[in-house]
Image (cartoon, helix red, strand yellow):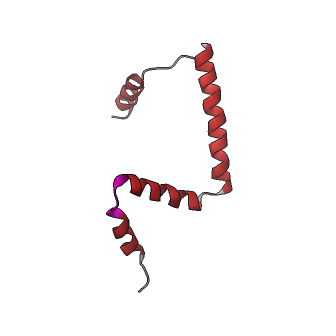
Amino acid sequence: MPTTLDNLADDALILPPEQRLALAFRLLKSVESEDEAGADAAWDSELAQRLERIESGKDQGRPAGDVLAEIRAKYS
């Protein structure tokens, strides 16, 4: 009997959380287009530039709690 999407999903949902995450990642990677794959390299470059600016003192970070509080206040 062929496996249906519902049967497959039911089977997947009984896996431990870390295995469900690994499965989800594999499924997403299997449909990722080349344009999306190029985005990883672009983000790596952007993150390296931001880190360099912070480490050199050109930019300063902000505590995550402050940023999240600001966002909550704006959208609440």
70 up-or-down from 16: above or below: above
Whole-percent x, y for residue 42 in the image: 66, 40
39 up-or-down from 24: above or below: above
Q: Residue at x 39, y 52 (%)?
A: 18
Question: In the image, 31: left or right of 63?
Answer: right
- Residue toward you, 16 or 67: 16
Question: Visible in this render: residue 59?
Answer: yes
Q: Main secondary structure of the magenta part?
A: loop
Question: Visible in this render: residue 58?
Answer: no
Q: Residue at x 46, y 57 (%)?
A: 24
The magenta-colored residue range is: 13-17
Kindly indicate the quadrant of the structure image that contains residue 48: top right
Is residue 53 shown in magenta? no
Whole-percent x, y for residue 59 in the image: 58, 17
Kindly indicate the quadrant of the structure image that contains residue 9: bottom left
Q: Residue at x 42, y 53 (%)?
A: 21
